[in-house]
Image: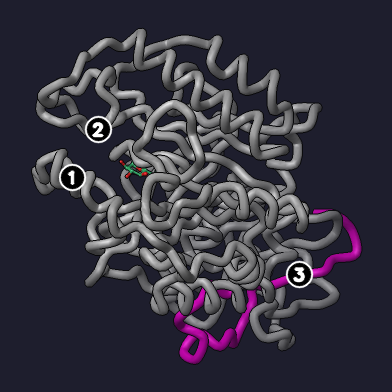
């Protein structure tokens, strides 16, 4: 169970579903955000993309409207990804949005829009940098094969640059709620950098991919084997996932996940007290791809219908032996989450053997049949237990069904 911080970071335990945004010049040709490295694009060729950077349809209000429609409650944006291109008016490098046809700081209007709505904002920052001359690229994972002509690899100098950028991000854009590091390839340890963020931005939670362990772990996509089955996490956790399987940035011909896969994934983490950051990559013009916006809208319909089962609840899966479901609880109410494909139209809740007063399918608002009785498949214990029946499993297939059970007493 996640212990509260007991300070300004506690917002992170209440607002659990966030929007992740990966946006940069890689979106112009519709490349995966790491294509410069994976596709061996020469650096001098890659940087010319900035000459086409002009997101004329960028509208942070529209982003936040869609985030709210999806049920999301905070937003984290890539201020600088591995390619080194900066979305803000940084004084530390020219490789930024000011020196493009766009000519504007793109973080400022987003920060202003978030602050006006009290919508928590976080900054993603890649420690790997394929542009800065001091960043020691040595051909390790997520690194260019070696220094470019004119580079002067020097980790300490690079860290001075990085700290100056972090200071800008933590002082120029008002209140921050998260600082999201990525790709500390060097595995360099330096707690003073997070200490600076904490001093400047006390509401900001910090993830574990920076220069120390930070506040929370960040399992990514479905890579961490077994984590989906784990019932508990040993630390605060925020899973991250993109709407497309191959890319975080906008990519042409992307392979989008099914709604059901994403809903299950979201439900699996939120019902276990973790946060979830679902990513979308805006197009180079600043608008969201139709497919991604459609996914977020459909997730939002589901999320808003079931949200009471996911927010301000405690995990309660230990109350049942049924491994196909997850349970959450609030006072006398128990929520049953069908996170796996139902094999029948019934759900067994053994060993719970008390009938609720009321059972409701949150997805539709319809009542759910229930009974406490002995069923033949319970051949070990021969005891009656609670069963939900006749769920609309053949009609409601592209969703996660969530049933609300109201009892007289807490279970
Ligand atoms: C990985 C990728 C990166 C992405 C990040 C999001 O670390 O390298 O492209 O930004 O995951 O979690």
The disc, 1 or 2, on the residue closer to the chain's N-terminal end is 1
* Residue 208 horizontal/vertical position (percent): 48, 27
Q: Which residue is mark 2?
A: 130
Kindly check if marks 1 and 2 are in contact, taking CB atoms under 8 A apart as contact: yes
> Disc 3 vs disc 1: which is toward the camera?
1
- Left or right: 378 with respect to 100? right
Front label number (3 vs 2) = 2
The question of residue 390 being in magenta is answered with: yes
Q: Is residue 243 magenta?
A: no
Task: Report the colour scheme.
Answer: one colour
Say which residue label 3 marks.
Answer: 405
**Residue at the location (51% across, 48% down)?**
77
Could you tell whether 69 is left or right of 228 in the image?
right
Residue 317 appearing in the image: no
Instruction: Work out how far the residue at label 3 is from the one at label 1, CA to CA, in angstroms.
Output: 52 Å
Q: Residue at x 71, y 38 (%)?
A: 174
On-image quarter of the N terminus: top right
Is 338 drawn above or below residue 9 in the view shown?
A: below
Residue 192 vs residue 36, the one in the foreground: 36
Q: Decide whether the magenta segment is chiefly helix, strand or loop.
A: loop
* Residue at which label 1 appears: 36
Magenta segment: 387-411
For the residue with label 3, is its CB less than 8 Å from the closest atom of ligand 1? no
Q: Residue 384 location in percent, x, y?
A: 67, 67
- The residue under the point 32% across, 70% down is 256
Is disc 3 surrounded by few (<14), some (14 to 19) or many (20+) residues within 10 Å? many
Residue at mark 1 to residue at mark 2: CA–CA distance: 9 Å
């Amino acid at each position: 169970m996640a212990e509260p911080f007991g300070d300004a970071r506690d917002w992170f335990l209440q607002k659990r579903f966030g929007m992740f945004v990966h946006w940069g010049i890689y979106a112009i040709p519709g490349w995966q955000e790491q294509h410069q490295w994976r596709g061996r694009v020469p650096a001098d060729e890659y940087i010319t993309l900035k000459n086409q950077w002009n997101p004329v349809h960028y509208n942070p209000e529209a982003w936040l409207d869609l985030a709210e429609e999806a049920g999301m409650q905070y937003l984290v944006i890539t201020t600088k990804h591995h390619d080194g291109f900066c979305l803000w008016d940084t004084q530390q490098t020219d490789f930024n949005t000011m020196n493009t046809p766009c000519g504007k700081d793109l973080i400022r209007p987003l920060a202003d829009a978030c602050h006006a709505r009290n919508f928590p904002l976080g900054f993603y920052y890649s420690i790997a940098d394929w542009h800065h001359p001091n960043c020691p690229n040595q051909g390790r994972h997520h690194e260019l094969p070696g220094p470019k002509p004119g580079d002067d690899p020097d980790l300490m100098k690079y860290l001075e640059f990085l700290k100056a950028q972090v200071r800008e991000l933590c002082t120029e854009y008002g209140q921050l709620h998260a600082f999201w590091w990525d790709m500390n390839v060097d595995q360099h340890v330096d707690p003073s950098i997070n200490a600076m963020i904490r001093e400047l931005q006390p509401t900001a939670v910090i993830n574990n991919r920076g220069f120390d362990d930070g506040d929370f772990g960040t399992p990514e996509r479905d890579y961490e084997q077994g984590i989906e089955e784990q019932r508990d996490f040993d630390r605060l956790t925020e899973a991250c996932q993109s709407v497309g399987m191959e890319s975080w940035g906008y990519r042409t011909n992307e392979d989008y996940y099914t709604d059901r896969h994403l809903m299950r994934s979201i439900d699996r983490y939120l019902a276990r007290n973790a946060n979830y950051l679902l990513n979308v990559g805006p197009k180079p013009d600043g608008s969201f791809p139709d497919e991604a916006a459609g996914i977020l809208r459909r997730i939002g319909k589901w999320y808003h219908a079931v949200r009471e089962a996911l927010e301000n609840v405690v995990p309660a899966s230990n109350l049942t032996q049924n491994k196909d479901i997850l349970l959450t609880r609030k006072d006398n109410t128990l929520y049953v989450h069908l996170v796996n494909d139902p094999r029948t139209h019934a759900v067994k809740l053994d060993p719970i053997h008390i009938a609720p007063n009321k059972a409701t399918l949150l997805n539709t608002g319809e009542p759910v049949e229930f009974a406490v009785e002995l069923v033949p498949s319970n051949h070990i214990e021969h005891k009656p237990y609670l069963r939900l029946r006749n769920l609309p499993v053949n009609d409601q297939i592209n969703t996660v069904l969530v049933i609300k059970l109201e009892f007289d007493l807490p279970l």
